[in-house]
Image (spheres, rainbow, N blue to C red):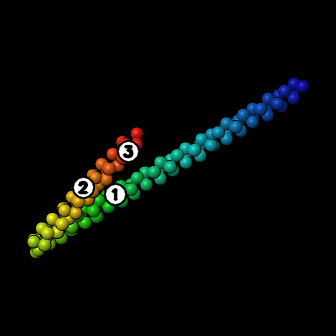
Amino acid sequence: MNTTAKSLSDDASKLAQQGLDSLSSAGKHASTAMHQVAHDTSNLAHRGMDALREGSEQLRESGQHARQYTTDHIRHDPIKSVLIAAAVGAGLMGLLTMVSHLKGDHRSHRGSGQ
């Protein structure tokens, strides 16, 4: 029986060692995966920053082009530019007035229902 106990003890020891080896291997794989995730995240961040930088540069150039176009248009046709600006201003004021009246009507209807 002593041999059986020794055999069981050896088997248990081997199983425990196999379990530790498996945990160690899993830990190494997890570490490798975490490093890969960190690397991929860093690459995505850099690509995002590059895209943002490129987009802001395009937006800046577009704004400069629009400003130059507007300035040239005002110089060449000042009366037409003033009339366009007045029409846009009047349209915006009409729109704001309409929106403020709609909000006022909505509030008064909601308040009378309670």
Relative height, residue 41 to residue 63 (above, below): above
Amino acid type, callout 3:
Arg
Q: Position of residue 106 (x, y in %)?
A: 35, 49
Quadrant for residue 51, please give it: bottom left
Q: CA distance from mark 1 to mark 3?
A: 44 Å
**Mark 1 residue crowding within 10 angstroms, few (<14) / some (14–19) / many (20+):** few
Q: Secondary structure at mark 3?
A: helix
Decide which of tag 3 and tag 2 comes sooner along the chain. 2
**Residue where numbered disc 2 is placed:** 97
Estimate how packed mark 3 is, as few (under 14), some (14 to 19) or many (20 or more) residues with alpha carbons within 10 Å: few
Could you say which is closer to the camera, residue 24 or residue 81? 81
- What whole-number distance in Å separates the C-alpha atoms at marks 3 and 2? 20 Å
**Residue 17 in view here:** yes
Q: Which residue is mark 1?
A: 52
Q: Where does label 3 land, which residue?
A: 110
Q: In the visual, does 53 lie left or right of 20? A: left
Residue at image point 29% right, 59% down: 56
The mark nearer the N terminus, 1 or 2, is: 1
Q: Tell me which amino acid carries mark 1.
A: Leu
For the residues marked 1 and 2, what is the alpha-carbon distance in whole angstroms?
38 Å
- Residue under the image location 15 percent in, 65 percent down: 86
Task: Name the mark nearer the viewer: 3 or 2.
Answer: 3
Disc 2 marks which amino acid? Thr
Q: Quadrant of residue 43?
A: bottom left
| Quadrant of the image containing the C terminus | top left
1 or 3: tag closer to the N-terminus: 1
Dot 2: element? helix
